[in-house]
Amino acid sequence: MRSITILLISLVLFTGCSLKDQSLSNNNFLIKFDTNYKALKNTKKYIKINKVKVNNTFNKTYIFYSYKKYKLDKYSRNNWSDIPSNMIYQELKLTFNKSNLFNNSNLSNADYILNTNIFEIYNKIEKNGAYAVLNLNFELINTKTKKSSFYNYNKEIKLEKNTPYDFVVTVNNAFSIILEKFLKDLESKTFKN
């Protein structure tokens, strides 16, 4: 009887310790642009990319969602791996370097300065589906003339499934679409010879 009791206690202890509740794990997500845009011609100009400004409400490691207008909630177990401004800044620098539109950044004597403002980045949930909302603008400043050009983008893309992961995939796709359009606009309109 004693050996059966010890066996049952051991079995319960080992079984309980080996089971992991997957629903309690935290997920950390990245903002990554997936653009392969390559300019047809290098402008031979230098650009300084300033730190990205994200609306303070959204510049947190929390991933936000909204069921109704004017109300934001945050996912409890799903977060950004860093604040969005840091991740977006790194991705912008990488994308601009890969695009070949500009020479590498020369901070002391840049021909252009790029300012980026993110106004909204959240998961909007409605009766008919969920959407990734991304609202941003780019300001390109010509350092010689001191003139600014503004490029505004507002995307609301429907998610395949209403999950935090699908939101992250969709918002990354929205960033990629916006950035590719922005680079094309710069190449075709701003730098036409």
Image (cartoon, rainbow, N blue to C red):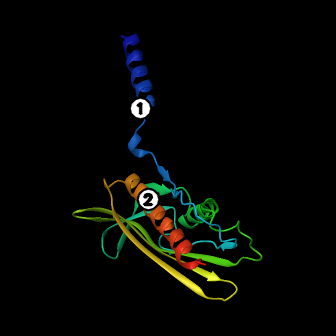
| Location of residue 152 in the rendering, given as x and y in whole percent from the top left corner | 46, 78
Q: Amino acid at mark 1?
A: Leu
Which percent across, then down, holds residue 26? 46, 49
Question: What residue is pinned by disc 1?
Answer: 19
Quarter of the figure that contains the C terminus: bottom right
Q: Earlier in the sequence, mark 2 or mark 1?
A: 1
Residue visible at 48% across and 61% down in the picture: 176
Q: Is residue 98 above or below residue 46?
A: above
Residue at 43 percent of width and 57 percent of height: 168
The residues bearing labels 2 and 1 have C-alpha atoms spaced at a distance of 36 Å
Q: Is residue 76 visible?
A: no
SS at circle 2? helix
Q: Nearer the viewer, residue 192 or 15?
A: 192
Q: Which residue sits at x=51%, y=61%? A: 61
x and y, in percent, of residue 95 in the image? 59, 61
Q: Observer-nearest residue: 118 or 61?
A: 118
Q: Amino acid at mark 2?
A: Asn
Assign the N terminus to one quadrant of the image. top left
Examine the rendering and report whether any part of residue 111 can be seen: yes
Q: Is residue 99 left or right of residue 103?
A: left
- Circle 2 packing at 10 Å, graded few (<14), some (14-19), many (20+), is some
Q: Is residue 59 left or right of residue 165?
A: right
> Callout 1: helix, strand or loop?
loop
Q: Is 4 placed above or below 150 here?
A: above
- Tell me: 114 left or right of 128: right
Residue named by callout 2: 173
Q: What's the residue at 40%, 52% (across, down)?
A: 165
Q: Is 177 situated above or below 192? A: above
Q: Nearer the viewer, mark 2 or mark 1?
A: 2
| Numbered tag placed on residue 183 in the rendering | none
Label 1 CA crowd tier, 10 Å (few <14, some 14–19, many 20+)? few
Nearer to us in this view, 158 or 127: 158
